[in-house]
Amino acid sequence: MTKAELVEEVSRVSDLTKKHSEVIVDTVFESIIDALKRGEKIELRGFGSFRLRKREPRKGRNPKTGDKVDVPPKRVPYFKPGKELKDLINRDTGEPGGEPPISDLGSQIAD
C-alpha cells in the first residue's frame, strides 16, 4: 500500500475529503518522525512500536574498489509489530491470500 492509497482509504472510511485525509496521514507520519528524532519511543497499542537502534561505528568495504572505509555510528528506526497485529495477520480468515479485512485491524486498534 502506498501513501496515496492510505490517504484514499482514510478518505473513504471517514467520509473526509482527500485533502483532509492527506493532512491527517501527513500529521501522523510527521509526529512519529519528530518523536524518533527526539529519541522517544512511539507505542501504538494493538499495532506496534517504533524506536531507534544505535549502530556502532565499523569498518566497511567499498564494493567497487574493495578499499576499507570507516562507517560512522548512526541511529536507525526500527518497528516492532504488536501481538494483536501479528495475530490478525496470521489468523486463518478463510479468504484467498489469508488477509484479514482492514476493518478488523481498525477495530482492534481502537479497543
Image (tube, rainbow, N blue to C red):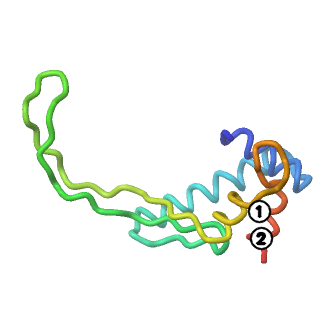
Query: Around disc 2, counting alpha carbons within 10 Å, would you say few (fewer than 14), some (14 to 19), or many (20 or more)?
Result: some
Circle 2/circle 1 CB separation < 8 Å: yes
The residue sitting at the top extreme is: 64
What residue is at 82 percent from the left and 62 percent from the top? 104
Dot 1 corresponds to which residue? 105
Q: Quadrant of the C terminus?
A: bottom right
| Residue nearest the observer in this picture, 21 or 88 | 88
Give the side of residue 111 with respect to residue 30, left or right: right
Helix, strand or loop at mark 1: helix
- Kind of residue at disc 1: Leu
7, above or below 52, in the image = above
> Percent position (x, y) of residue 76?
36, 55
| Residue nearest the observer in this picture, 16 or 64 | 64
Number of on-image labels: 2
> Percent position (x, y) of residue 102?
80, 55
Dot 2 corresponds to which residue? 108
What residue is at 78 percent from the left and 50 percent from the top? 21
Q: CA distance from mark 2 to mark 1?
A: 5 Å
What residue is at 73 percent from the left and 46 percent from the top? 6
Helix, strand or loop at mark 2: helix
Residue 19 picture quarter: top right
Residue 7 picture quarter: top right
Give the side of residue 57 with respect to residue 51, left or right: left
> Percent position (x, y) of residue 27?
64, 57
- Kind of residue at disc 2: Gln
